[in-house]
Image: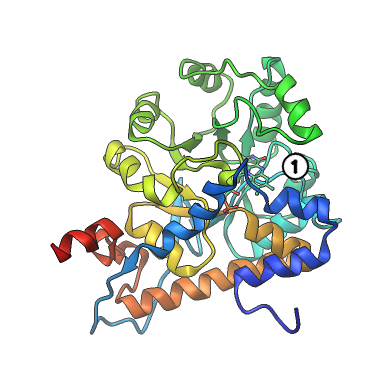
Amino acid sequence: MVGEPLNVNEFQELAREALPKMYNDFYAGGAEDQYTLKENVEAFRRIMIWPRILVDVSRIDMSTTVLGYKISAPILIAPTALHKLAHPEGEVATARAAAACKTIMVLSFASSCTVVEVASSCQAVRFFQLYVYKQREIAAVLVQRAERNGYKALVLTVDTPRLDNGSNLAAYANKAMDASICWKDIEWLKSITNLPILIKGVLTGEDAIKAAEVGVAGIMVSNHGARQLDYTDATINVLEEVVHAVRGRVPVFFDGGVRRGTDIFKALALGAQAVLVGRPVIFGLAAKGEYGVRQVIQMLKDELELTMALSGCPSVKDITRRHVRTERERLHAML
Ligand SMILES: Cc1cc2nc3c(=O)[nH]c(=O)nc-3n(C[C@H](O)[C@H](O)[C@H](O)COP(=O)(O)O)c2cc1C
């Protein structure tokens, strides 16, 4: 590729050029037929924006709050494993970029820099993502270490009783991870920490209701970037069901296939409080280190700002359900 990347998708190409094939495949790939991997992105294309005109958009305010922390735009960094495979500075570079962009980074349980290294490298608000191992004491130690080092929330990832097959990492994790964890264990997790707990990996209204009932601080609609169960629906297609089910009791976050500012606008219109971005951040990191991650976030911010201006939404709270139409709604309107 020649020249500067013009959008987030072009970073994928730069990352492919920068990385050994094995690492690139690890980051870019999805489960089995990779049907859901494609759908996560494609499903956004079937949702159309319905803009409003003659609204004063001379000032656009993208800022929002997540669990009370003010951030510059509703774009968080999703937890993704092993950033040092992408760049020698690993998660430290990603965290610095998060700080520079005034947003939140969720550090993966499978990070290649330690919780302490990342904490001491920058002022970014950080959450810690957790998998629970069979040896529960390990989870307790890790949670308390995250708490001591200033991480502000726990993100419990629940879509991985087993990892999708194929790597030594998966083989190891499948042995170590506790596939018996269930709803009652949220009480146990609450008993070992004072941090708010978010549940990542909710895909149905039914589970969203259970999550709200056990008292989590937030729900993340996610199919793990289509790396776990293939043939789950695209996350943008299930977001609204989850939002309706929780009826505002807890905030709903969203990830999967976010590549454009218009995607973020659509997710917010369907009820997400903010989105998380996975692969594009790794591609930015692989291509250009911290600067690349900053560029990726900045591009998404610029695109969201433009989308808001052109849609007649001066602030994120002005983005409503009436600003988008799904394919089904458009077909219905034609009847
Ligand atoms: C290479 C890679 C590693 C990931 N590692 C983790 C992880 O350690 N923990 C976790 O909860 N999610 C993990 N995820 C899932 C992301 O948090 C997120 O759900 C997903 O990447 C969002 O989709 P996107 O990549 O299309 O933005 C990983 C995703 C990728 C691509």
Q: Residue 304, position in %: x, y?
A: 46, 71
Q: Residue 56, position in %: x, y?
A: 28, 82
Judge from the rendering whether residue 58 lies leftward or rightward of residue 36; answer left or right. Answer: left
Q: Quadrant of residue 136?
A: top right
Q: Residue at x 77, y 50 (%)?
A: 83
Residue topped by disc 1 = 111
> Could you classify mark 1 by the number of other residues whose Cα lies within 10 Å: few (under 14), some (14-19), or many (20 or more)?
some
For the residue marked with disc 1, what is the amino acid? Ser
| Vertical side of 268 occupied by 211: above or below | above
Q: Is mark 1 within 8 Å of ligand 1?
A: yes
| Vertical side of 280 occupied by 202: above or below | above
Using the rendered image of the protein, determine whether residue 79 is visible from the camera's viewpoint.
Answer: yes
Judge from the rendering whether residue 19 lies leftward or rightward of residue 224; answer left or right. Answer: right
Q: Residue at x 45, y 54 (%)?
A: 274
Using the rendered image of the protein, determine whether residue 63 is visible from the camera's viewpoint.
Answer: no
Q: Residue at x 50, y 18 (%)?
A: 182
